[in-house]
Image: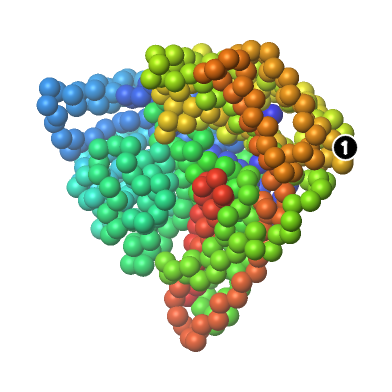
Amino acid sequence: MAERAASEGKSRLLNDYNLYWGDIHNHNAVGYAKGSLERSIDVAREHLDFFAFTGHASWHDMPEMPGNRHMKWVEGFKVHTDHWPKTRKLIEEANTTSFVSLLGYEWHSSTYGDFCLIFPEHQPDLYLPDNPKELFAFAKDKHAFAIPHHVAYKQGWRGANWSVFDPGVAPVVEIFSEHGCTESDRAPYPMILHSNGGRSQSNTVEYQLKNGLRFGFVASTDDHFGYPGAYGEGVAGVWAEDLSRAAIFDAIRKRRTYAVTGDRVRLEFLMNGEPMGSEIPGAEGRRAEVAVVAEDAIHMVELIKNGRVIRRHFPEDTAGERGTLPRESKCRIQYGWGPWAALDLARTCLWDMTIRIENGRFTKVSPCFQAGPYEETLRDRVHQRSDREIRLTSFTSRQDAYLQDPTKSVVLSMEAEPNARLAVEVTEPHRVVRKVPLDDLVHDNEVTFTNVFTSESFIIHRLVLPEEYEAHLEWEDIVQSQGSSDWYYVRVRQHNNQLAWSSPVWVG
């Protein structure tokens, strides 16, 4: 069972909106990355609510490289152009009442930065001008978005050129992707994976918000293994009225969006009763309401005002001693590791795992599937047989693992009786069965190797209790002048270093 946000129920704070998860920036071999578009659609449909394919389309001011190595990109752009009619057809066919697929492409520029064009409806034209003014005019005519990407690179090195920023086509900005985090030059997840250099503080979202620009936040993967929604590379949460192209576009345009690095933290934020992304009248009293349901133990929830943290909440400050098994809890099952590549033993390992609960039931299963390794024919799939049994088929490898993490995982949300047990039966790569009383998992985890030394292993992690993964907060901020103009957003950090950022609210 892939996580379907609509099944989680209505928002607690945001009126009648539902939470949907998507990736609106990703790549495959229709360009110069890996994997077929058909595979990307299949992967996205398995664990996302919506996605936009944004193939590499053009780079008019691309620098030439020694040995003509830049021709890889030139040839990729030709592949994208030649495939455009088929791309349009596949994206249109993929759009259903239960899955939203959006057409898009990425426009690159050393001078102006990169933009992902995303269209609300079928779009026959592949328009590739050599300047942003014409690009934005085209986007406005088509009611499309042109969302800036990896903005914190230095200007001239594919960082954002904020002098041409146009909120009419860019209501949101990508704050996180596999490139790293562009919140500030001191934020976690520095930009170290590519050769575009580190973060320029004057190009970060924090700096530009202080300069008076207004935009919401999204995250998306920019994955090059044809794996939309890849864990750890960024996903967008959207609060929308329903799962349709029109509703998703409306939510993005109104900035009811937020960004997560990997774990799908449920985040709601209102200021004086208005949702994230809003612009509200000036007021001396500002009342922030925050609701968080994380996928792991929350380290802290922060309220940021004008770039400065003004409130912090640490759940462990008020949590009691871990005692007996609660009625509700979460448990992460993480699997992979495996042979060391240094010993020339790297391989792609197939997993077949059945997870059962006795005297309890599963209420939700959240996939945490990273992109690596690239395998065209293999899939990570969660098959929900009942609320007591789940079958997982997956694959892991040390080779080509994103950030050298050779593991994948699922997070189980559960309701259980005091005598409940969790049973994990692995038939691939080797047959292993582990049965653990949930009460034992309150205080300890269970590490299991599937075979002899260097073989793959899995961990049934310690339970995460409601007081650790939930937070419901109200904070007041009183200002001296009703006419002052300020902006606020919420940042959530879990103990496992997964983060979430709400879009800002502007007051005044």
The residue at the far bottom in this view is 480
Quarter of the figure with the N terminus: top right
- Left or right, residue 306 beside residue 364: left
Q: Residue furthest left?
A: 66
**Residue named by callout 1:** 419
Number of on-image labels: 1
Q: Residues within 10 Å of mark 1 (few under 14, many from 20)?
A: few
Residue 378 coordinates in the image, percent (x, y): 53, 16
- Dividing the picture into quadrants, the one containing residue 142 is top left
Tell me residue 367's x, y (percent). Answer: 61, 33
In this rendered view, identify the residue nearer to me: 316 or 188.
316
- Residue with the most extreme front position: 453
**Which residue is more in the foreground, 257 or 314?**
314
> Which residue is depicted at the point 87% across and 34% down?
359
Residue 35 position (above or below residue 212): above
| Up-down relation of residue 418 to residue 391 (above or below) | below
Q: Can I make out residue 276 in this image?
A: no
Type of colouring:
rainbow
Question: Residue 60, how many percent across, how many down?
Answer: 20, 36
Give the residue at x 73% y 19%. Answer: 433
Image coordinates for residue 106, horizontal then vertical, percent: 34, 36
Q: Secondary structure at mark 1?
A: strand
Q: Is residue 476 visible?
A: yes
Q: Return the residue nearer the eye: 447 or 15.
A: 447
